């Protein structure tokens, strides 16, 4: 099972650069998501890996074969990959079984009997046993999607590519299918690239997530890495909700904004340099009056501006006293504070994450 | 790559060469370049009159087509009119009926003395004067309009289908009557389609040759098309014909440009949000009259003309009542017995099939290349494929005559010049249909095949072709139907041994052989409807766009 | 039917009677060529009949009949020549002027059909390039169901009467040689003013000289101001209520020449066909069933038609027809609009 190495990939359409020097490494058997808003270049990347597009610069390696470069592109049919499309792309004039068998027919050394067996097995795996003679037009969206999955997996590809395969499903089905896809990945362990704009989906499915912004990879890491330690403003805002405070580094381990002082768990900041600090709303604790003070070194007093009851959480906006900063806080229910009440906020230094990279314009 | 390039080159040659000659001839003379021909064209009182007649004809046909087509479109697309399928089918029949056949039929119906309708009127009322005289400008306008209104109908009906009825319901709830809703809400939304339909009808009227030749000439007036044809009679004044053709071509181009602007602004199409359900407006007590009105129109374009054609085909003397002794199959024997007719039928079928095959093939190729953006500059291909719609048939014929009656390529005298004319003329229709076909085949269907190991050609054969097949066959049918009824170019380019059915019918008109005309006319209609039948089965929906 | 059989038999005899070797050689050559291409302005049914007779007499040599109006035939011939196409073998129209033109341009083959020396002078061209195949006269015709014999017009001048407004039909000199001859003849009689006045009666315009008979028979317009008398004769014979008037001022005589094209692709078949059409038998067929006059002195005519000798004929000068062709067409269009 080979891995995928993308080096300095650049793709331009006229004057517009869809990708600008993109680097990424997918280890053998790993599932990496390409996550980002529309227009960030993730589908372009996928199509370049598949061989449908030719790069202006950079290379794509699978194992020890260079498959794409500005001078030559191995055509899609010889790249030993499989792809699941956003529209599923099931051929309406063929039955489900014929759809699934298509790739097998093109593989040398798979006689008819073996083909049929494998198709049947795959139908079982995706829980569509007995649907072989139906036509795609007769199936529901979810069933069509599973046929697409079966069609891709049955050829035992070296690399599996998925282009937002869940975006056409309704919310409940989407959640269910996330886990299903993760399960399939763990069963078959194929090196996979998964494109999505849904960060929750990426976090559930992937081994690692690559966040794309304007044609570049801005951060790669596990879900936890990205969530706990975002490196740029964009990543911090894209993954989960966050509070961003523009501050200035003071003594080692301290940042200030006006009268506001926060202890951070990072020491190497240059004094006087501007720094953006990301604080996740659920890592801020609310201390009620009369309660014992928290052991956290960051203690702020503030006034509740609004409180919204969401059922499984309460969302507060608190204005910090003596500062222009308003922080969003997510607390477990019940809602004990009301608008206008004074409240104490406590945060651990680890919760205040300075973003290490300046935003590229 | 070379395949695509040769296709592009073929298109360029088809279009550019003849037009070049047209322009050149219109200013050429023995003493060098001159504007004398243009001067002659614009100062000669006869030619001026022809110009004026054409403008009058086109304008009134546009209005009349609108007056007929728009209400019918609204009734079928928006209300609970009964018998919609029947009405649609009849409008389709109108659409494919060659207008010159309709003109013949109406000569037999409304000739001031022998016309059947007039005879009926006179016997009932005892009047001496006829009720209708088809050999007049109003008569010509009428006959052209009843075969042109389907263009307006299609344009407006398709637009209405796209508009959600929520907008109209909002008005109804506020108390507006059905008519008021139609006038104040629906009408403005379909205005671009209405104007566009008007222009289409005008364009059709400008380019027609057969109907004016049949109805205007006996009444003593010309239109541009008949005048150009007359200029080709011996001794031919080819330079004048060229000079007269150029303004017609420019007028057509201008109108099409305007039409494109109107539609390009997406005046129609979904106005935001989900296009909701379309609920029908109840007509209530107006249902029977509305249906009667629609059927009345169809009587004029289908029932009466087809009826009289059938009568003339089977009667010894068409103007006499259909008694037992008047019935005969002799007309059939006579018509199909003429060697000229038989060879014309063979020519028509040969040309029809050849043009349809090459045309559909070329159109499919170009449409595929454009849809998959296979070569740079594919927009140019689209433009070239659609460009011939700008050239009226007569003008195209003049241009082709000029281009191909001299070395290096002398096609005149063979079927090839007709083939080139038909191919050029039908390319826009063929391309539009092919384009729509390939739009319906998602590119991801092909990508899916490729990533699973199929090469480009295999994908084309196993995935694209089966899915595009019915669309391409429909393209074939469209082109075929267009070819067999073509008259305005054929009448200039034919030679005695390369006649086609439409030309033979026209010849027979000059002899007054109504029986033979009717027989050939019915034959032509038979072929047309057979092709339409094939198309409907394949496309699974109305040729004009409404889903079954 | 019987007459037809007799004609065929007679023809076969004629064919058999000709000098064996010369005839055989020519027939053989014609068979090799396979067909003769005939551009003819003779009414379609008549042309087809002649063609079928020929094909019956000479199996293996087909006749390709292309029938259209005289002016169109000339246009075709000239157009084909311009494109260097050699398609036509035998050219036959009703406009003598055409043949002056064609001969001048050296487009005709010099050929004298067998037995034509006994024809009257009007049917022969002095240099031997073309000969009169048939003749007809322009007449007035009316629908006897609608117009009584008493009301019917008797002279060309009668047609100018305003009472005929909207009731007349004319064919077109721009299409038909018969009509071009007629127009010129009346210009000789009464000048162009005649036509100018006639136009005020709002005539219906048709193209071919054959067409007015259909118009009159159907009653669409009850009176035809011109047209070949043979077509009216045929229509009347079919049982239609058509009557012919031979005006006293004179009837324009139209002798329709036939010639072989200089570049004829099937010259032997063309010569064979030409001989055939000028033979007594075929000329008799033209007279009997088609109502035509011919130049053959031995042909007998039906008794219900006036003899040529009894009519006051207005002959046409071919040279004048050729010279004034443009003028005729132009002024006609000027008065009648199209």
Image (cartoon, rainbow, N blue to C red):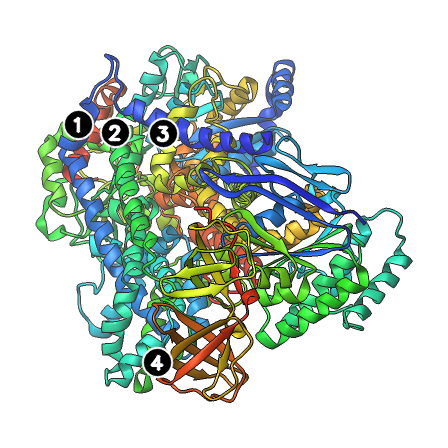
Determine the chain carrying the residue at label 4.
Answer: B
Do marks 3 and 4 both belong to one polypeptide chain?
Answer: yes
Q: Which residue is mark 3?
A: B19
Label located before the other in sequence (1 or 3)? 3
Label located before the other in sequence (1 or 2)? 1
Q: Is residue A66 left or right of residue C239?
A: right
Q: Secondary structure at mark 3?
A: helix
Q: Give whichever of B153, A98 is nearer the camera.
A: A98
Q: Which residue is mark 1?
A: B40
Q: CA distance from mark 1 to mark 2?
A: 9 Å
Q: CA distance from mark 3 to mark 4?
A: 50 Å
Do marks 1 and 3 both belong to one polypeptide chain?
Answer: yes
Label located before the other in sequence (3 or 2)? 3
> Nearer the viewer's eye, disc 1 or disc 3?
3
Q: How far from the left and from the top, in percent, is residue C308?
A: 30, 32
Label located before the other in sequence (1 or 4)? 1
Q: CA distance from mark 3 to mark 2?
A: 12 Å
Determine the chain carrying the residue at label 2.
Answer: B
Q: Give whichever of C148, B96 is nearer the camera.
A: B96
> Nearer the viewer's eye, disc 3 or disc 2?
3
The answer to whether the residues at label 3 and label 2 have Cβ atoms under 8 Å apart is: no
Q: Which residue is mark 4?
A: B281
Q: Which residue is mark 2?
A: B243
Q: Residues within 10 Å of mark 4 (few under 14, many from 20)?
A: some
> Nearer the viewer's eye, disc 1 or disc 4?
4
Q: Secondary structure at mark 1?
A: helix
Q: How far from the left and from the top, in percent, is residue A304?
A: 39, 80
Do marks 1 and 2 both belong to one polypeptide chain?
Answer: yes
Residue with the most extreme front position: A251
């Amino acid at each position: 099972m080979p891995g995928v190495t993308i080096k300095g990939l650049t793709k331009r359409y006229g004057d517009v650069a869809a990708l600008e020097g993109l680097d990424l490494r997918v280890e053998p058997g790993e599932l990496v998501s390409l996550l980002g808003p529309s227009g960030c270049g993730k589908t372009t990347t996928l199509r370049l890996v598949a061989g449908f597009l030719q790069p202006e610069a950079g290379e794509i390696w699978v194992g020890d074969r260079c498959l794409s470069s500005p001078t030559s592109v191995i055509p899609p049919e010889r790249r030993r990959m499989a792809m699941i499309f956003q529209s599923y792309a099931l051929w309406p004039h063929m039955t489900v079984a014929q759809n699934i068998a298509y790739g097998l027919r093109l593989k040398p050394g798979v006689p008819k009997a073996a083909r049929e067996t494998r198709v049947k097995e795959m139908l079982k795996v995706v829980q569509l046993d007995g649907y072989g003679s139906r036509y795609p037009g007769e199936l529901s969206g979810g069933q069509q999607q599973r046929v697409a999955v079966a069609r891709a997996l049955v050829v035992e590809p070296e690399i599996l590519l998925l282009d937002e395969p869940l975006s056409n499903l309704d919310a409940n089905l989407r959640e269910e299918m996330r886990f299903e896809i993760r399960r399939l990945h763990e069963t078959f362990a194929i090196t996979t690239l998964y494109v999505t704009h849904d960060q929750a989906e990426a976090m559930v499915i992937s081994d690692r997530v690559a966040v794309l912004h304007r044609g570049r990879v801005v951060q790669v890491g596990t879900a936890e890495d990205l969530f706990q330690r975002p490196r740029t403003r964009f990543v911090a805002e894209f993954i989960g909700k966050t509070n961003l405070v523009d501050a200035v580094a003071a003594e080692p381990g301290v940042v200030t904004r006006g009268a506001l002082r926060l202890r951070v768990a990072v020491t190497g900041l240059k004094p006087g340099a501007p720094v953006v600090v990301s604080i996740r709303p659920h890592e801020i604790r609310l201390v009620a009056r009369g309660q014992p003070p928290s052991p956290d070194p960051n203690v702020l007093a503030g006034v509740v501006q609004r409180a919204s009851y969401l059922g499984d959480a309460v969302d507060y906006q608190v204005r910090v006293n003596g500062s222009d900063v308003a922080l969003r806080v997510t607390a477990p229910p019940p809602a004990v504070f009301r608008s206008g009440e004074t409240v104490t906020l406590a945060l651990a230094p680890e919760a205040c994450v300075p973003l290490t990279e300046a935003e590229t314009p | 790559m070379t395949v695509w390039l040769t296709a592009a080159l073929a298109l360029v040659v088809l279009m550019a060469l003849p037009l070049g000659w047209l322009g050149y001839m219109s200013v050429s003379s023995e003493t060098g370049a001159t504007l004398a021909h243009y001067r002659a064209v614009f100062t000669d009182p006869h030619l001026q009159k022809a110009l004026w007649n054409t403008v009058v004809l086109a304008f009134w046909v546009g209005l009349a087509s609108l007056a007929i087509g728009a209400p019918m479109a609204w009734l079928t697309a928006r209300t609970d009119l009964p018998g919609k399928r029947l009405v649609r089918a009849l409008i389709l029949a109108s659409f494919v009926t060659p207008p010159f056949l309709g003109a013949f039929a109406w000569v037999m119906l409304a000739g001031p003395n022998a016309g059947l309708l007039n005879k009926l009127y006179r016997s009932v009322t005892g009047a001496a004067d006829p009720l209708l005289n088809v050999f007049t400008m109003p008569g010509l306008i009428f006959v052209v309009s009843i075969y042109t209104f389907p263009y307006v109908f299609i344009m407006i009906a398709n637009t209405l289908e796209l508009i959600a009825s929520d907008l109209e319901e909002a008005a109804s709830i506020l108390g507006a009557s059905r008519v008021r809703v139609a006038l104040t809400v629906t009408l403005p939304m379909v205005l671009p389609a209405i104007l566009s339909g008007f222009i289409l009808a005008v364009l059709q009227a400008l380019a027609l040759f057969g109907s004016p030749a049949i109805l205007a000439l006996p009444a003593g007036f010309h239109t541009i098309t008949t005048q150009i044809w007359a200029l080709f009679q011996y001794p031919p004044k080819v330079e004048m014909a060229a000079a007269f053709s150029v303004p017609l071509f420019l007028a057509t181009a201008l109108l099409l440009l305007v039409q494109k602007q109107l539609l390009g602004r997406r005046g129609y199409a979904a106005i935001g949000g989900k296009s909701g359900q379309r609920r029908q407006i109840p007509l209530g007590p107006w249902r029977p009259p509305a249906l009667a009105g629609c059927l009345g129109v169809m009587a004029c374009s289908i029932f009466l003309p087809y009826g009289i054609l059938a009568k003339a085909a089977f009667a010894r003397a068409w103007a006499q009542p259909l008694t037992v002794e008047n019935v005969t199959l002799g007309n059939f024997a006579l018509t199909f017995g003429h060697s000229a007719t038989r060879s014309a039928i063979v020519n028509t079928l040969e040309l029809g099939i050849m043009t349809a095959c090459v045309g559909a093939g070329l159109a499919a190729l170009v449409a595929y290349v454009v849809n998959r953006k296979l070569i740079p500059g594919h927009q140019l291909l689209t433009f070239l494929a659609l460009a011939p719609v700008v050239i009226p048939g007569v003008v195209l014929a003049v241009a082709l005559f000029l281009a191909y009656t001299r070395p290096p390529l002398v096609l005149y005298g063979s079927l090839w010049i007709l083939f080139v004319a038909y191919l050029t003329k039908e390319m826009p229709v063929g391309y539009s249909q092919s384009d729509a076909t390939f739009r319906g085949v998602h590119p991801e269907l092909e990508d899916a095949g490729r990533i699973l190991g199929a090469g480009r050609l295999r994908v084309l054969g196993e995935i694209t072709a089966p899915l595009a097949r019915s669309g391409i066959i429909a393209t074939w049918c469209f082109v075929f139907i267009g070819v067999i009824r073509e008259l305005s170019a054929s009448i200039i380019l034919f030679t005695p041994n390369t006649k086609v059915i439409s030309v033979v019918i026209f010849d027979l008109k000059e002899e007054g052989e109504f029986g033979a005309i009717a027989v050939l006319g019915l034959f032509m209609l038979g072929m047309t409807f057979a092709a339409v039948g094939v198309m409907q089965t394949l496309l699974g929906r109305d040729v004009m766009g409404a889903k079954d | 039917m019987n007459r037809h059989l007799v004609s065929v038999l007679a023809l076969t005899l004629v064919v058999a009677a000709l000098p064996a070797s010369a005839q055989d050689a020519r027939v053989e050559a014609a068979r090799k060529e396979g067909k003769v291409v005939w551009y003819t302005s003779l009414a379609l049914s008549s042309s087809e009949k002649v063609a079928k007779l020929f094909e019956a007499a000479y199996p293996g040599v087909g006749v390709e009949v292309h029938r259209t109006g005289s002016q169109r035939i000339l246009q075709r011939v000239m157009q084909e020549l311009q494109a260097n196409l050699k398609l036509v073998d035998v050219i036959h129209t009703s406009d003598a002027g055409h043949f002056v033109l064609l001969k001048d341009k050296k487009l005709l083959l010099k050929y004298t059909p067998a037995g034509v020396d006994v024809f009257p002078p009007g049917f022969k061209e002095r240099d031997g390039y073309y000969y009169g195949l048939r003749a007809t006269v322009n007449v007035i015709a009316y629908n006897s169901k609608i117009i009584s014999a008493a009301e019917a017009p008797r002279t060309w001048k009668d047609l100018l009467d305003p009472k005929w407004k909207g009731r007349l039909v004319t064919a077109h000199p721009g299409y038909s040689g018969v009509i071009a001859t007629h127009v010129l003849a009346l210009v000789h009689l009464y000048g162009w003013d005649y036509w100018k006045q006639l136009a005020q009666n709002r005539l219906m315009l048709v193209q071919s000289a054959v067409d007015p008979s259909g118009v009159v028979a159907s009653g669409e317009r009850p009176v035809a101001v011109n047209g070949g008398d043979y077509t009216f004769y045929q229509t009347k014979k079919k049982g239609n209520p058509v009557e012919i008037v031979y005006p006293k001022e004179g009837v324009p005589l139209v002798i329709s020449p036939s010639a072989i094209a200089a570049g004829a692709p099937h010259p032997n078949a063309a010569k064979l066909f030409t001989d055939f059409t000028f033979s007594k038998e075929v000329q008799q067929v033209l007279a009997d069933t088609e109502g035509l006059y011919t130049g053959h002195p031995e042909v007998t005519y039906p008794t219900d038609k006036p003899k040529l000798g009894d009519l006051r004929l207005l002959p046409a000068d071919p040279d004048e027809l050729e010279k004034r062709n443009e003028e005729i067409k132009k002024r006609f269009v000027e008065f009648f609009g199209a």
